Amino acid sequence: MTKKFKENVCEKAVVSEFENRRSKLTRFAIIIGIIVGATSLIAFQGGIPKTMAATLMVISFMWALIVHVKIWRCPSCNGHLGRLYLGLKLPKFCPKCGIRLIEE
């Protein structure tokens, strides 16, 4: 019975950490979206050269890719969780270790 209790506590910690990482990734995506939107708006109005705007957007997307690869991992085994699909298709279990990631 104690082993079952410890596994349950561990699973709750993993679910909590997964929610924390998902929230960080969502906040970061919103910030990147604002940066890209503002940059494109300013560039199309002639405020900055288009080459500078393109450079800023490429840097933003590369930064987003790096953050995605670093954060979108299983809290238990640190395995990558696969594609994100903009939060529409969240993994219920880790594809590597099989631990539950979302409380149902």
Image (spheres, rainbow, N blue to C red):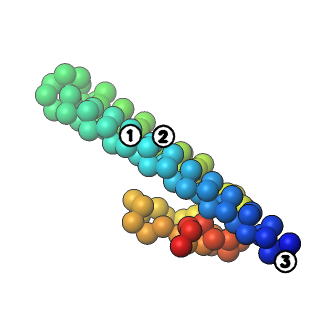
Q: Tag 1 or tag 3, which sits nearer the N-term? A: 3
Which label was assigned to residue 32? Answer: 1
Crowd rating for badge 2 (residues with CA inside 10 Å; few <14, some 14–19, many 20+): few
The mark found on residue 1 in the picture is: 3
Badge 2 marks a residue whose secondary structure is: helix
Q: Which residue is mark 2?
A: 63
Q: Is residue 73 visible?
A: no
Which comes before the other along the chain, label 3 or label 2? 3
Q: Is residue 22 above or below residue 90?
A: above
Image quadrant in which you'd find residue 74: bottom right
Quarter residue 47 falls in:
top left
Residue located farthest toward the bottom when viewing the structure as drawn:
1
Q: Are marks 3 and 2 in contact (CB under 8 Å)?
A: no
- Tell me the residue at 20%/28% (across/down): 42
Which amino acid type is shown beneath numbered disc 3?
Met
CA separation in Å, label 3 and label 1: 47 Å
Q: Earlier in the sequence, mark 1 or mark 2?
A: 1
Q: Nearer the viewer, mark 3 or mark 2?
A: 3
Choose top left, top right, bottom left or bottom right for residue 87: bottom left
Q: Amino acid at mark 1?
A: Ile
Q: Quadrant of the N terminus?
A: bottom right
Are circles 1 and 2 on residues that touch, CB within 8 Å?
yes
Q: Residue at x 19, y 33 (%)?
A: 41
Q: Percent from the top left, x then y, of residue 58?
A: 39, 39
